[in-house]
Amino acid sequence: MLASSKDNTDSIMKRKGQIMNFELSTPEEVSERYKRCFASLVCDNIKLIYLKRTLVIDLLKQPDTFECKVTGCFVRVKNDLKGYSHHKPQKLYQLGQVTGINKSSEEYKIRDISTNILLCISNMWSDVKISVLSDEDFEEEECEDLRMLSQKEPSKRQTVVAKRIETLAVHG
C-alpha cells in the first residue's frame, strides 16, 4: 500500500491522508496515471524503503548490486553535534535519502567488513560512513522534518511508480 498526494484530478486518487491501494506483479503494469502521482512522505511509505545499518552492511556483501539497491532508499543518520553552533540546537538523528555512493581514499571497518564506501545523502553536507547509520526505527518527528526539507526541493520528490519499483528491488 502506498499513500499518494493529490496532484491531479484523476478519480483513482484519494484525498489527503487516505491510502491508495494497488497491487502490481511487474512494474510494466503501471498505468500512466501513477507515473504522474507523487508519493507522500509519510512514515508508512518511508518504511517500505528504509534501510537500517544492519541491512546496508548485509548489502555490502553484494558489491555488484550495492549501489542500485541503496540509491533512492532512506536511512537514518546520526548527526555530528560537535560541528554545530550552540545557537542552533540540532537533533541527534536525521532521515535522508541515499542519492548515490562515493569511495573514500581510506578504508574503514564495520563489523568484519572493510570498506571505503561512503553514502551520498540528501540534505547532508558531506558523504557519510555506513557506521553512522542508525539500526533503529525512525520517529514521526523525523518524517515531518523530511517533509519540510522536501518542500524546499520539490523536484526531488518521488513518484508512486518509483517508490513501488524501489520497494520491489530492496525487498524482492
Image (cartoon, rainbow, N blue to C red):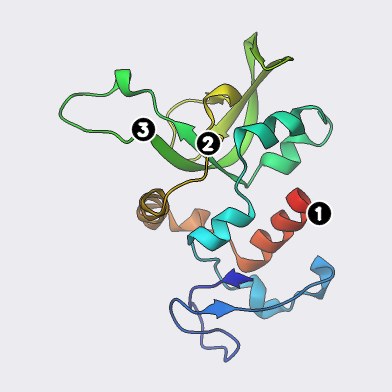
**Disc nearer the start of the sequence (1/2):** 2
Q: Circle 1 sits on which residue? A: 172
Residue 85: where, in percent of width, then height? 21, 23
Q: Circle 2 sits on which residue? A: 121
Q: Is residue 27 left or right of residue 149?
A: right
Q: Residue at x 51, y 88 (%)?
A: 9
The quadrant of the picture occupied by the C terminus is: bottom right
Please identify, in this view, whether the residue under mark 3 or under mark 2 is nearer the observer.
3
Marks 1 and 3: CB-CB under 8 Å? no
Q: Residue at x 27, y 24 (%)?
A: 84
Residue reaching furthest left? 87
Q: Which mark is residue 92?
A: 3
Residue 107: where, in percent of width, then height? 66, 10
User: Which sits in the foreground, 170 or 97?
Assistant: 170
Q: How many marks?
A: 3
Residue 100: where, in percent of width, then height? 63, 36
Per the image, label 3 sits on a secondary structure element best described as loop
Q: Which mark is residue 160?
A: none
Q: Residue at x 40, y 28 (%)?
A: 79
Q: Residue at x 73, y 79 (%)?
A: 31
Disc 3 residue type?
Leu
Q: CA distance from mark 1 to mark 3?
A: 32 Å
Per the image, label 2 sits on a secondary structure element best described as strand
Please identify, in this view, whether the residue under mark 1 or under mark 2 is nearer the observer.
1
Q: Is residue 52 left or right of residue 84?
A: right
Marks 3 and 2: CB-CB under 8 Å? no
Residue reaching furthest front? 136
